[in-house]
Amino acid sequence: MKSSQIGRYLDELLETVINGTPPRGPRRRAVSRLADEVRSSECRSKRVVTFGGGTGLSTVLGGNSQLDDWPENPFIGLKQEFPHLDVVVCTTDDGGSTGLLLRELPMIGIGDFRKLLLSLVLHENLRKTYGRDDILTRQILRAIHGVFNHRFPKGFRDFRYVADPLLVVPPHLRGCCPNALADLLSSLGGYISPGGKGPVIAPGGHCLGNLLLTAAVFQSDGKAGARAPGVEAIEKGIGLLSQAIGVSPGCLHPATPTPGQLVLRYSNGVAVRGQRKSAVTHRLLPIDRVSVEYCAPPRVSKNVCSAIREADLILFAPGSLYTSIMPILQIPPLVQAIRENRKALKILGANFWIQEGETDISRRQREHGFHVSDLVEAYDHNIAGGSEGLFDVVLSANLEHIPGDVLRNYALEGKRPIYLDRARVESLGALPVEATIYSRERLNAASVIHHDPQKFALAVRTLLFAHQRLNLKPERALSRPLPVRTPGPPCTDAPLLSSYHRQTGSMLAEKRFSPRTLRNTMHEMIWENRDIRIGHLKCFRGARIVPASRWVRSKEWDNVLGYYDPEDGILKVHEQVSGDPERLRDNLLIALGESLLGRYLESRRWVNPEDGIHWGGRRYEIRLRPLRERGCFLDDGDLRTYLRLARMLPSPHDPDIFGITLNDREGFLPPGLLFGLLYAWYLNNAYGEIMEYEMSLLRWPPGKLIPCQLEERVRKQALIQFFRNVVFQHAGE
């Protein structure tokens, strides 16, 4: 059979196995018979490796353990179908409780491990460990669920609830908790509480499960937070909690123990560090490249590579494309092991919905959003060697029968389905299949569409069975629609995030802030924008909120409410924005950006025509200070390059004079203001409307522009490249 025929046949088989709805027509009997064979087939001996992170992976493994009702039906999903299961987890998460931990400790992002540990709990393991009947086993699980998911409010500092974690669950559940489990939880909580042997971690803003997991890892390492724990310590710490809560030992692995930070590069050339950026900056542009900056060459456990090479099934779980799956495949040994395994069936689980900031805009056709083929193409574009040898089958959700009002409600939230475009997926060398794998119970009860763990597991089981019968490895396309990426070597000397947070805090402590609370505001802003280099903070002496009565900045050029004053070295922000955290942050970023130029100007002026005749033009000139007096972040060559990019041309008579000739009524952004605006826009899309207008030519393909526009587009692209490589010090490709 051709690939398209096999795909349609599998669609029918999947619906029959999962939902009991055989096809109409002559294939009904044959498909029903084959479905019975699937249900009775043996799969418990098969070795399975899954990749992913966060909610998507935990849901298909054993249900979304963050939900309040998860303990009512926890023993479902892939973990029940495939006992020989290895789970490889992305480690670049930097949000929420994990982000707070990364500020204080040298470690990988650990928040996803908490979700996955709960989802992997097995009933028989709990019973075997504690010897309790079914009722008490369920109560133990509810207590574990309550402890691991409990989140302390921001600023909370009562360590009693950390030292004795069972205090966060209802009293009737504390009593059913076995002494061995209670003692372990207390010992881990005590380890990170005042008087313990480990690093003291204030509970405010944290999930208790993250704190306990962190304690287990650092206790296993024995260095009390002095260095990033190695793979042995991480797996030992995870194993300690796994055994205690009924998870099969040795099944949960970090993709790498080496701390790293995600870098997202957008189609306009802007590259920013940090996973949270994709969700909060709203750039309205497709992501072009993804990479990871590590603090050292990324290590990989030999056990993980062995599991991949011996696997019968390799599964990329549904989840965030660029922030859950792609970072794992930036690690060469893992990709190599996947490709070397030629016997395993490799499945890519497609998401239901587009994800704002990540998959809401297609690189190929921006107007139509993401399709399943765009997911496949993203691997070609970002992984060395492309998608070749990574997956054979793409499993998508059939959303055909979703009520229109449900789809409308999702659309109002900015979520649109990722539709399966079969022909293009096939042209990219993967077999597309589609099945109804969402939970109809949740759809009927709450009008929400989530993966059904059991249906997903049945779908995977069916595909594995079909692979044994039909060989689902399709013939690869002879010519691929997209070129395959050949990336340069990964960055392996990035600073630890905890070191970055500590250094920036120390530098801010030496500066003057009025009011004093502005120091904390600025430290938080710097953490959220970790592209700010340490050297940037050497360029100013402090920051101040200026009352309206003392605001003397001229409005000739702009109405921006933040600037750098080179006379006293202070970042100054108008009191009008002090009560608006977002506007305060944006204007602080502009002022900080301006400070990088230091005292580079000796003078500035409008030049009058020498002959006294005004022909409708005017000229603006600046004179540079001597190099030793500037206090500029940029060296002399970089400063002069920037001025040219800002449309300021050097005088043929004096190399320190730069100028621009304008029409009489032509608007103009002076180089200092432009630098500050570009700095803030680049980091966090601050003053986005203004700057998007300024940089709008970058949204148009060169083929649609006339020569003068092309020239301007090249200049603006060079500006972005200058900021990316010189100001924010990203390695260029």
Image (cartoon, helix red, strand yellow):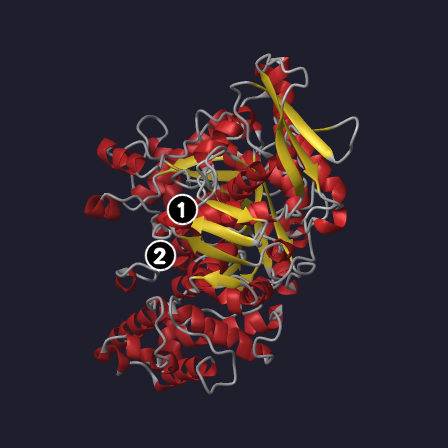
Q: Is residue 544 left or right of residue 123?
A: right
> Looking at this rendering, what residue extends furthest in the front direction?
612
- Name the image quarter holding residue 653: top right
As displayed, is residue 689 above or below residue 592? above
Along the line of sight, which residue is nearer the eye, 35 or 630? Answer: 630
- Residue beneath disc 1: 583
**Mark nearer the N terminus (2 vs 1):** 2
What is the C-alpha distance between the residues marked 2 and 1? 36 Å
Find the residue positioned furthest to the left: 445
Badge 1 marks a residue whose secondary structure is: helix
Q: Position of residue 8 (x, y in %)?
A: 43, 30
Q: Is residue 463 visible?
A: yes
User: Could one spot residue 239 in this view of the protein?
Assistant: no
Give how far across and how far down residue 68 sits, in percent: 27, 61
Between circles 2 and 1, the one closer to the viewer is 1
Residue, x 59% and y 55% (percent of image)? 540
Q: Which residue is mark 2?
A: 64
Provide the secondary structure element on which disc 2 rests.
loop
Give the residue drawn at x 36%, y 52%: 453
Q: Are marks 2 and 1 in contact (CB under 8 Å)?
A: no
- In the image, 161: left or right of 193? left
Tag 1: Cα neighbours inside 10 Å, few (<14), some, or many (≥20)? some
**x and y percent of residue 76 in the render?**
35, 58
Q: Amino acid at mark 2?
A: Asn
Compared with residue 396, is residue 214 higher up or lower down, i.e. above or below? below
Check the picture and name the quadrant holding the C terminus. top right
User: Residue 169 occupies which quadrant of the picture?
Assistant: bottom left
